[in-house]
Image: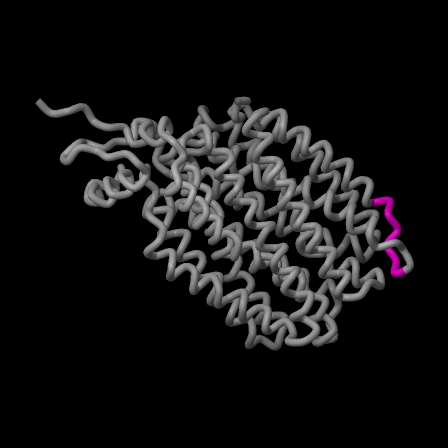
Amino acid sequence: MSSSPIDVGQLIDRGRWGGYQRLLVGLTALAIIFDGIDNQLMGVAIPTMMREWSAARSDFAPVVSLGYVGMMIGGAVAGLAGDRFGRRVALLASMVLFGVTTMAMTAVDSIAALAALRFITGIGLGGAIPNAAALSAEYVPVRQRPFAVTLTILCIPVGATLAGLIAIPVLPVLGWRALFLFGGLAPVVVAVALRWALPESPRFLTRQPGRRDELARSLARMGHNVPAGAELVDGGSAGAVRASIGGLFVPEFRRDSSALWAAYFSCMLAVYLGFSWIPSMLTGAGFTSSVASTGITVFNLGGVVGALAAGVCITWWGTRRAMLTMAALAVASAGSMAFVHLSPTAAVLPILALLSTTGGLLNAVQTTMYALAAHVYPAAIRATGVGSAASFGRVGAVVSGYAGALALEHGGSMTFFIVMAAAMAVCGIALAIIQRHVAPR
């Protein structure tokens, strides 16, 4: 008599979070560090490029926005690819794409060429994140899932912080081309290494009968030895809709998908206003390039601390209470920045402290939204759900490329931070509408 099928999803969800699984989450997070570095390089390089090419800040708005258009396309396409062909394949392909095109930027001499390459780079940057989130979610037990996903996604501000720190000594000596060379070469090398070090998602492999042995080996390394010949299934995906954008808006998911997309849009508008325009805002106010690089560094470093704290908060308090509180505090912090006078004669430390606080709160909300999205959708459509929500959020990032330039040109830093605060208020409202929040522990 044949034995009962083994539910791989339940096996992992009810198991322990062992050392091997922690390593896998760490390797996935490493991939996203390079995503964060390449994401931020353009923002820290623009002030230097403006001087070298005698260009205005507004001339770079298409470069910034086209990069986000690419991220929007990449998130949707790579999310679908991850659900259909494998999360690992889509993640590593995305890393190679944004690495190669970032290296190619070292040869450009015009804004048009830069914009075209940034668009292609954006496709890779946008494609890496949803697949990394899905991998982290599916390596670990359900009780650790929100923290594992948040830990992975917080590596975006970690990478962005590193980009700012690297820029401080490199830009004045070697220039922006050296930054892009490093930012492109490193992810390609790491992607090649991860080809052998990072396994495919076990829950994805249950839908690939020809890869049963690969699945069994991966489960064994996680501490789950399965009998030879046992049938391996994922009960959580039984009867799930096929991975598609339309599947996210069936009656079961329509309300949460709509609210999640709105939350991503407004939060990314606020976050990418900071990513893209804080360095040029500070240099435009008369600060040196070192202060500008420090400003974006503390903004992102605050994001790292905020995201770590948020991961703990959503584990204990659930996502509804924690995220709504963080969104409200982000509105207050950005609103406070609107009334800070930026000039070379102003005290720098209070400005940097407020930038760090604002960055911490904005990134805390953004990173935990990936954990929330991974919780909302079942495994069969998880990468598509996360990727599509993040892709729609990139529309907010695209808008930030123009909104930031317009706000700074016509209203200065006050208008800039008012726009940021208003975006986070909309985000908070959208998060309140979502029904499938992670419950408190």
- Residue 343 is one of the magenta-drawn residues: yes
Front-most of residues 70 and 369: 369
| Residue 75 higher or lower than 163, as above or below | above
Front-most of residues 392 and 185: 185
Residue 428 x/y as whole percent? 66, 31
Q: In the current view of this chain or complex, which residue is farthest to the left?
A: 1
Specify the color scheme. one colour
| Residue 178 higher or lower than 282, as above or below | below
Front-most of residues 22 and 125: 22
Name the side, left or right, on which 226 lies relative to 76.
left
Residue 318 x/y as whole percent? 56, 25
| Residue 375 higher or lower than 282, as above or below | above
Residue 188 x/y as whole percent? 44, 64
Total tally of numbered discs in the picture: 0
Name the side, left or right, on which 152 lies relative to 273.
left
Name the side, left or right, on which 297 lies relative to 375.
right
Q: Which residues are magenta?
A: 338-344
Q: In the current view of this chain or complex, which residue is farthest to the right?
A: 345
Q: Residue, x 68% and y 55% (percent of image)? A: 297
Q: Residue, x 51% and y 70% (percent of image)? A: 103
- Principal secondary structure, stretch drawn in magenta: loop
Q: Quadrant of the N terminus?
A: top left
Q: Quadrant of residue 294?
A: bottom right
Name the side, left or right, on which 190 lies relative to 343.
left
Residue 80 seen in render: yes
Residue 273 seen in render: no
Q: Residue, x 38% and y 61% (percent of image)? A: 192
- Residue 182 is one of the magenta-drawn residues: no
Residue 203 x/y as whole percent? 32, 37
Q: Quadrant of residue 55?
A: bottom right
